[in-house]
Amino acid sequence: MGTFKSKILIYSLLLGSFPTILIGFFSYFIAAKDVEEKVNEGNMHLLNQTRMRVEQVLDSMQRTALQFENSSLLKSVMDSKLSGQDFIKVRELTKEMFNLQTQTILNQVYVVNLKHEWVVDLNSLKPLAGMNRAEFDRYLDSNESIFWAAGSGEISQTANPVETDHWDSAEQTATTLRLVHKLPLLSKNAAPSGILILQITAKDIRSMLEPVNLPASQYILNEQGEAFLSPVQDREAYRSINAEVSARTGQSGELQGAFHAESEGNKVSVLYAKSEYNGWTYVSVVSLDKVTDQTGNIALITAAACFGIILTVLITSWFGSRRMYSPIRKLHEFATNVQPQQTDDSRKDEFEFIRESLTSLAVSRNELDKQMKSQTVHLREFYVLKLFTEQMSGADDRYASERYGFPTGWGSLGVLQLELDNLQQSRFQEQDRELLLFAVSNIVSETLPEEARFSPIVLNHSQVTLLTCKEESAEAGLAMFYETAQHIKAKVHEYLGLECSIGISHPFKRLSDAKRAYKESSAALKLRFILGSNIIVRYADIEDQGNTTEKTVYTKLRLIEDQMMLAMEERQLEQVEQLFQRYLDKLLCKDGFHQEHHLLLLQLAFRSVGIAQEQGLSMQQVWNGEEELKHLFRLQTRTEIAGWFRSRLFKPVIGILEDMADKQFVNITRRIVDIVEQQYDQDITLDYCAAVMNFNPAYISRVFKKEKGVSFSEYISEYRMNIAKNLLATTEMKVSDIGRKVSYTNISAFIRTFRRTFGLTPGQYREQLHSEEG
């Protein structure tokens, strides 16, 4: 059907689409090339910034070396034969060498005296014989007086690298870059008397080569075209690229440029810039996929423009062709929407197809009516749900009543909100709550006639029912709603064996006020935190206490909070629980914050977790994240709140704090014992031990006595007497010498303490030993 119309449409599309697609491809490739040039220009700018940053550091090292070389201190020590007795000169020299680090990022400095054969670095004075002489000879063989050299770590006899890196040490990879100055700066033919070496790690140089704004790999080639500061894997990956860069800078003399290459099977864009400062070449390698990321936006814009033009051509072609097909077009489109074409429809004319479509429409309508009747219950519940969430205005009450079969002619409306109490004390589990609420909705539907209610629904973990009352009086409406709530409550207990609480809103007239009434019933239901569970509360019973009363209650709550935090820090679980009961008394009292109690409980929970965090613990060790937060907001009674805080916060946090305190006690006691065993012959006191360990003396005294069972003074006295007893038995030392050995300057005090400890004087103990041996 519509063969002539289809031909015109296809011809018009080809005439307008082909030039559009051709121009789109041409525009994209030109724009992509311009973008790549701009990206390379920006990358080259970043590479030059990196080069200048590295050269600035290297230049700073050279200027620092020249200043140090011309210092009078260095000239004086170069004429001296330093030894261990010249520690003052060595200290002054190392101090000046340390000062060099404040200007540049140096990890080592060497001053080598070839004449007197000594070497001073940042750590000590060493003989030249103990160093890697071959390394120094290599530097002396150079014709340059000042030059850069790559190294593999510290200059020592073992020549083992000291820098920890992820490179392969078997490849002799350079881990340091050294600036070598021959001393003094003489002509090339004169023999130097010393060498000054400033050393910087290759890791620090590489850190300057990490681009901040570009996901690229940057490295440096020396004059021989070697990536002397790069890891082995990078050398192998970019070996062909390095050869190409060396060829371009060597043959053509180009100082900078860009080209495409392939590395490990990936196409990359290579940019290079040769430095006139020291002949190094700085190279940046970027994946072509990252360079051409921006061309994707151009492709999208170009495709969108082409699509827009093609769409315009399509619309124009369509409206042009339909004028030639107008007699039956509208009827055919209508029939096509009613009944999709079948495989053999090409043999039928348009009118036959329209007739069959109208027949099919009549049959479909009958089926639709049957389906709508079966879905009426769900539609009614959906409408009520939208009323409570303000997605339905409720302005057209008559239309809703006629369409969904809701009650009509009411005098007033009211909202009842029901929540189940304490499932833990029943045969059901918490995960059964939603199913139980649906069961309550069914109970309400069967208990109340349809003219007395709208469809009951489940919303936000509660069952909600919109009631109707024939009376317009608010007092009559409240009385009827309260009686209905009692009836529903009794039925829930009869069928499910569960206790529940119900909140009742103020009576209202219009369906558009359903959302406000729902909030009122929720607010009324929160009073069960004060009055307890298994209650019916009307919103009219809630009284506003004013801001002054709230501020007073909050001040008292804050004071109790502080006392609880102090008790938790002292690990007093019983005191914490007593204070929490006082906290709940203030929070859930008539003048309290029953409307915002969950927020205040959340604040208390975070303060409790914060105590554990202050001791270095993570929140995950005591707090299960979002699940705990959801559980806290679902707590419904005072008993549930008290039980949750005790089991999920107070007890776990205090238990963790006690474990940490026990470990700390053991460590403190062990350190005190170590001090006594190492310094028993000195005048050590508890204050001295506290100062060494950076603790309060009274605190470590309590800890030590708790762990050892004796005081510090008793322990050290007993330890010294045991040392003295051993010396009396194994040596011929005088009693007075032994007394001084165990830090007793008064011999009488020593004898008294020994006799009090062992029941004998030192002399009697030694005579007893001799008599036993004889």
Image (cartoon, rainbow, N blue to C red):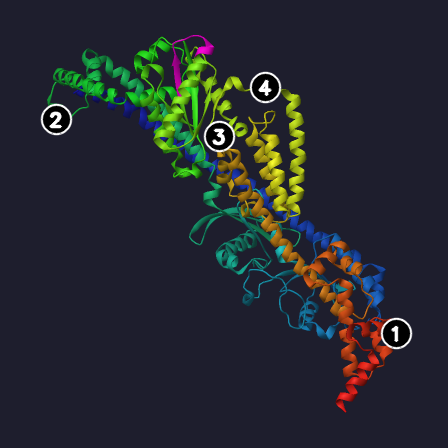
Residue at numbered disc 4: 544
Front-lying residue, 395 or 341:
395
Q: State the CA–CA distance, disc 1 to disc 2.
A: 126 Å
Residue at numbered disc 2: 344
Q: State the CA–CA distance, disc 2 to disc 4.
A: 76 Å
Residue at numbered disc 1: 747
Comparing labels 2 and 4, the label whose residue is closer to the camera:
4
Query: Which mark sits nearer the N-terminus, 3 or 4?
Result: 3
- Labels 2 and 4 touching (C-beta < 8 A): no
Q: State the CA–CA distance, disc 3 to disc 1.
A: 79 Å
| In this rendering, position of residue 661 left or right of residue 519 | right
Residue at numbered disc 3: 533
- Which residues, given as a range, are shown in magenta? 465-476
Front-lying residue, 420 or 157:
420
Query: Which mark sits nearer the N-terminus, 2 or 3?
Result: 2
The correct choice, above or below, for 483 with respect to 298 in the image is above
Q: State the CA–CA distance, disc 2 to disc 3.
A: 70 Å
Q: Secondary structure at mark 2?
A: loop
The kind of residue on which mark 2 rests is Asp
The C terminus lies in which quarter of the figure? bottom right
Q: Residue at x 70, y 69 (%)?
A: 136
Task: Point out residue 411 in the picture as x, y percentages from the top left corner.
Answer: 40, 8
Q: Secondary structure at mark 1?
A: helix
The kind of residue on which mark 4 rests is Asp
Query: Which mark sits nearer the N-terminus, 3 or 1?
Result: 3
Q: State the CA–CA distance, disc 3 to disc 4.
A: 22 Å
The correct choice, above or below, for 238 with respect to 418 in the image is below
Residue 452 among those drawn in magenta? no
| In this rendering, position of residue 186 left or right of residue 380 | right
| In this rendering, position of residue 750 left or right of residue 198 | right
Q: Residue furthest bottom?
A: 774
Q: Residue at x 36, y 17 (%)?
A: 453
